[in-house]
Image (spheres, rainbow, N blue to C red):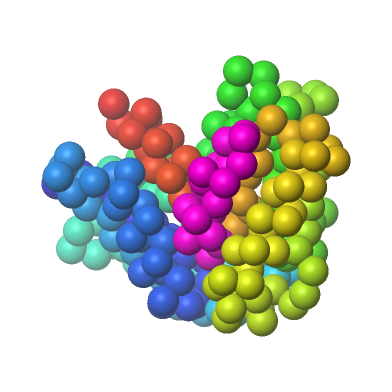
Amino acid sequence: MTLVALVNPNTNEATTAMMAAIARRTLRPEDGYEVRGVTVAAGPPMLVDEELLRASAGHVLDAVDRLLAGPDGDRVAAIVVSAFGDPGVEELRARTPVPVVGIAEAAMREAGADGRRFGIATTTPGLAAAIDARAARLARPGRYTGIRLTPGDPLRLAASPEEMTERLAAAVDLCVREDGAEAVVIGGGPLGEAAEALRHRFPVPVVGPIPAAGREVLRLLA
């Protein structure tokens, strides 16, 4: 089995399990892939601002170091960093010999394929500037239509999945109708189930970042 480590940069074990389960729909066991969820040892249960995002990079590096030093370390074929700010991705690429995929960059690359204009819908206003900056680095000029945010506290929304999905749906609608997006990325690993629920509700592609990262892993390991 080809082992892919999915690292959750927050400390919520249930979120790790949910994201790993979504990844297994792309990196399927029947195709020879094993997705192992790895939760960082320290930090908050959800990354909601830039300070927490920056701090999580060190926790991601520590988690990967522990995994690679463990009994299955030599089996790890790829690493997915499953937070939308891609914390620690560049550092991991500099120090590990296997492919490293950030879910934000994978999703933006997929959404912007073939020159499409894409927007981002998410729940965390405290990360909006960091997301905008990453999109500016990754997107072709004029292809990023901007970010649309759900109203309400992101931690409270996370505890109400149906409400969160509907508020994200409204944000996706604004990306399409108001901003002219031809694809929309759901901006967050913990929003993975909502992204799955919204995939077929709009006339444009709604890109879930975890499946996009899985497809990137398949491409890199092919």
Q: Name the foreground residue: 175 vs 141.
A: 175
Q: Horizontal placement of 79 versus 30: left or right?
A: right
Using the rendered view, name the quadrant where residue 141 is placed. top right
Using the rendered view, name the quadrant where residue 20 is placed. bottom left
Locate residue 81, reporting x and y percent.
48, 54
Residue drawn at 65 percent across, 76 percent down? 157
Residue drawn at 69 percent across, 73 percent down? 154
Does residue 61 appear in this view?
no
Task: Report the number of discs.
Answer: 0
Locate residue 219, reporting x and y percent.
37, 28
Q: Name the foreground residue: 59 vs 1.
A: 1
Locate residue 104, reporting x and y percent.
59, 46
Does residue 215 appear in this view?
yes
Answer above or below: position of 174 versus 18: above
Image quadrant holding the C terminus, namely top left
Q: Name the foreground residue: 76 vs 83.
A: 83
Answer above or below: position of 219 versus 4: above
Answer above or below: position of 70 versus 155: above
Residue drawn at 60 percent across, 18 percent down? 114
Membership of 27 in magenta stretch: no
Locate residue 147, reporting x and y percent.
78, 48
Outermost residue, top side: 114
Q: Which residues are magenta?
A: 189-208
Q: Name the foreground residue: 133 vs 169.
A: 169
Q: Horizontal placement of 203 versus 93: left or right?
A: right
Using the rendered view, name the quadrant where residue 183 is placed. top right
Residue drawn at 54 percent across, 60 percent down? 194
Outermost residue, right side: 178
